Amino acid sequence: MGNEGDPTSIGSVLVHMGAISESQLWEALSYQLSSDVAQAIGDILVEQNACTKDQVSMAVLAQKGLRSGKQIATAVAVADVAQARKKVQQQASCDVVQKGRELVDRLGYEYTPTPVFGIELALLKR
């Protein structure tokens, strides 16, 4: 757990990306500390289904830019983290909508998307 105060650690970058929560990071760090097998934190997080391999790869690239000390590389890394965060949030939003539609189908309702004030609401009919 030696990198817990390092804002450029993979775990910290993943938290800032929005890919994982702080509690997921602490759980993975605790597992890493108690394990007899040396394992990278990114691999543990993927194993625990806290994030994907792609998200860890994005975090590694961002980490390299942040640690380079060069202003341009740091700016690009920060932009990459922001873009990755947006992508994670969009994917989570899509997952929620899909799960909602599956539940509506399972309950025997008909899903009719209806835009209201720029937000798509669902009218449910049996």
Image (cartoon, rainbow, N blue to C red):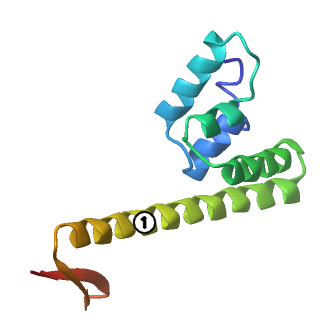
Instruction: Name the foreground residue: 120 vs 72.
Output: 120
Left or right: 90, with 6 as reference point = left
Residue type, numbered disc 1: Ser
Report the front residue among 47 and 12.
Answer: 47
* Residue at the spot 72% in from the left edge and 60% down from the top edge: 80
Image quarter in which the N terminus is found: top right
Label 1 SS:
helix
Residue located 75% across and 29% down the image: 40
Q: Considering only vertical position in the picture, is 6 above or below 46?
A: above
Q: In which quarter of the image is the C terminus?
A: bottom left
Report the residue marked by disc 1: 93
Residue 21 seen anywhere in this rendered image of the structure: yes
In the displayed structure image, the side of residue 16 where residue 122 appears, left or right: left
Look at 61% across and 23% down and name the residue there: 29
Query: Where is residue 55 drawn, in percent x and y?
Result: 67, 51
Write the residue at 76% across / 18% down. Answer: 38
Q: Is residue 7 visible?
A: no
The answer to which quarter of the image holds residue 30 is top right
